[in-house]
Amino acid sequence: MPLLAFTNADRPEGIGSGVLLSVPPHFFLLTAAHVIEGDHRALFMGKDGQLVPLSKRCLLWPKPTGDHKGADIAVRGLEPLEFTPFGRDRFLTLRDTLPGSAGTRGGDLLILGHPKNKVKVSRTSSLVEHPLFAYCAPTVTDAELSDIGYDSDMHLGMAFRQKDSIRNGQRTTAPVPEGLSGAPLFGFNSLRSDSESDPLVGIATTWRKATPECIIGTDIGIALALIYDAFPECDEAFAVDGRSAAASNDS
C-alpha cells in the first residue's frame, strides 16, 4: 500500500509504504513511525489511482520508554470511509501474522512495497500509481543484528544487495528502496503449499547501505501489542487466535 503526502507544489509524493490489518471490530494501517510523523497530511492510494485521506484517529506508536523503546512502528485506526474503498479482502488478519519472527531465522524474507516514482508526470493518477516491488533474500542473523546495534527481540533483517539482484534469471540492479519504509515483511518458504500463505512477520523501517547491506524491520508482535493494549474491544479476536494473543502479551 503506497503512502503519499502533498508537497509544496500541491502534488502527491510517495513517502513510504504500509499494510492493512483487520482485528475485529477494527481496521488498521501499519507502517513505520517515521513515515507518518510530523504535520504533513498522509494519504494512501485507493482503487483506480484515487487518493483516500487519512484522519488523525487512533495513531499509536511505542512510548519513548519501556520494553519497546526505539521501535520504529506505527498503528493507525481507520474510519469506515477510509477502509471501505479497499474491500475486506485487502486486509490481512491475525491468522496471517507470526509474531516473534519464529520460523524466519535462517530462512528468507519477502518485502512488498512501493519505491518512490521517479517518473515526471502531471496526472495525479500517474503520481499515485506506484509500481509494486517484491524482493526475497535470506535473513540477517541475530549476531549480525547485534553487531550493528539492533535488538533481535524487536528487529529482524533481510540481506539487500541492490547491485546483485536477479530478475528473470538475469543479474540486475534493484530499485533504490526509498519509499519501502513501512512495507510488510513476510516469512518466505518456497516449500509451502499453494493453500498456505507466507506470514506477516515485520514492518520494514531502515535501509542500511553499509556492510552488511540490509533492510531492517520491526517485529510485527510490537504492532499487535499496541493494538491489544489500546483496544479492549479487540480482546475476543485475540482470544480466538490464541497464538497472536500470547505473542502480543509477551512482547
Image (cartoon, grey):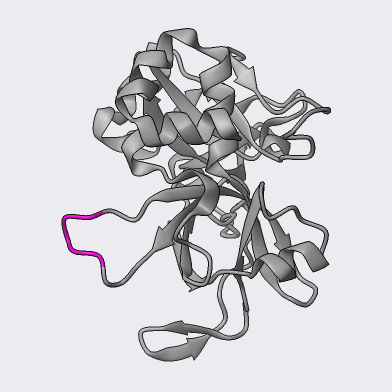
Q: Position of residue 30 (x, y in %)?
A: 53, 34
* Residue 142 visible, this orientation: yes
Nearest the eye: 20 or 232: 232
- Range covered by the magenta-colored residues: 192-196
**Residue 187 colored in magenta in the image:** no
Residue 206 in the image: x percent, y percent?
70, 55
Q: Quadrant of the C terminus?
A: top right
Q: Is residue 157 above or below residue 241?
A: below
Query: Taking 152 as reference, is 230 left or right?
Result: left
In the visual, does 14 lie left or right of 136?
Answer: right
User: What residue is rendered at 69% in x and 35% in y?
Assistant: 33
The residue sitting at 49% across, 90% down in the picture is 171
- Considering only vertical position in the picture, is 112 above or below 225? below
For the residue pair 209 and 167, the one nearer the viewer reads as 209
Give residue 190's position: percent from left, percent from top: 31, 72
Give the dominant element type of the magenta stretch: helix, strand or loop: loop
Magenta span includes 193: yes
Front one among 172 and 156: 156
Q: Nearer the viewer, residue 112 or 174?
A: 112
Task: Please indicate whether residue 76 sits to the left or right of residue 188 in the image.
Answer: right
Q: Count every numbered label the image shows and give the total.
A: 0
Task: Please provide percent x and percent y for residue 43.
Answer: 55, 29
Determine the residue positioned at 63% across, 69% down. Answer: 140
